[in-house]
Image (cartoon, rainbow, N blue to C red):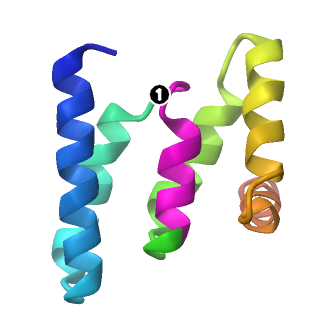
């Protein structure tokens, strides 16, 4: 990802954090939509963990869908392992179950 994409991602993360803090659901939704555009395998783990902190279910779900679409199996396994070893590993598994069983 280019530097501009990284800057925009950081901007939307900061905006999402503020929107969550001040309970602005419409702004949270817009931030989630914007972050979905900038979601890739390189920022997948931090965005998933951030989504857990700020109760952004939609963003978390998109992160897991992105993880499942990573074509490089080794990279996919490494990302999955990193998520499972995080404090939110159980949430990651829960989200995968939701995607496949809903």
Residue 24, horizontal then vertical, whole percent? 18, 83
The mark total stands at 1
| Label 1 residue SS | loop
Magenta residues, dominant SS class: helix
Left or right of residue 88, residue 28 in this image: left
Left or right of residue 81, residue 25 in this image: left
Any magenta on residue 43? yes
Residue in front for this viewpoint, 63 or 99: 63
Residue 31, horizontal then vertical, whole percent? 23, 58
Residue drawn at the location 51% of the way across and 25% of the way down: 42
Query: How would you rate the neighbour count of disc 1 (Cα within 10 Å): few for under 14, some for 14-19, many for 20 or more?
Result: some
Residue 61, horizontal then vertical, whole percent? 57, 55
For the N terminus, the image quarter is top left
Residue drawn at the location 48% of the way across and 62% of the way down: 51
Residue 41, horizontal then vertical, whole percent? 55, 26
Q: Is residue 84 above or below residue 44?
A: below
Residue at mark 1: 40
Q: Is residue 80 above or below residue 19?
A: above
Q: Is residue 6 above or below residue 32?
A: above
Residue drawn at the location 18% of the way across and 76% of the way down: 26
Left or right of residue 35, residue 39 in this image: right
Any magenta on residue 97? no
Left or right of residue 16, residue 79 in this image: right
Picture quarter containing residue 93? bottom right
Q: In this view, does 82 lie above or below 52?
A: above
């Amino acid at each position: 990802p280019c530097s501009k994409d990284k800057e925009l991602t950081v901007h939307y993360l900061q905006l999402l954090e503020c929107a969550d803090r001040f309970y602005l659901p419409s702004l949270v939704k817009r931030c989630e939509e914007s972050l979905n555009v900038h979601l890739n395998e390189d920022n997948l783990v931090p965005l998933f963990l951030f989504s857990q902190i700020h109760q952004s279910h939609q963003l978390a779900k998109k992160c897991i869908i992105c993880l499942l679409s990573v074509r490089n199996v080794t990279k996919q396994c490494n990302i999955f392992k990193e998520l499972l070893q995080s404090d939110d590993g159980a949430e990651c598994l829960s989200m995968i179950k939701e995607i496949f069983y809903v």
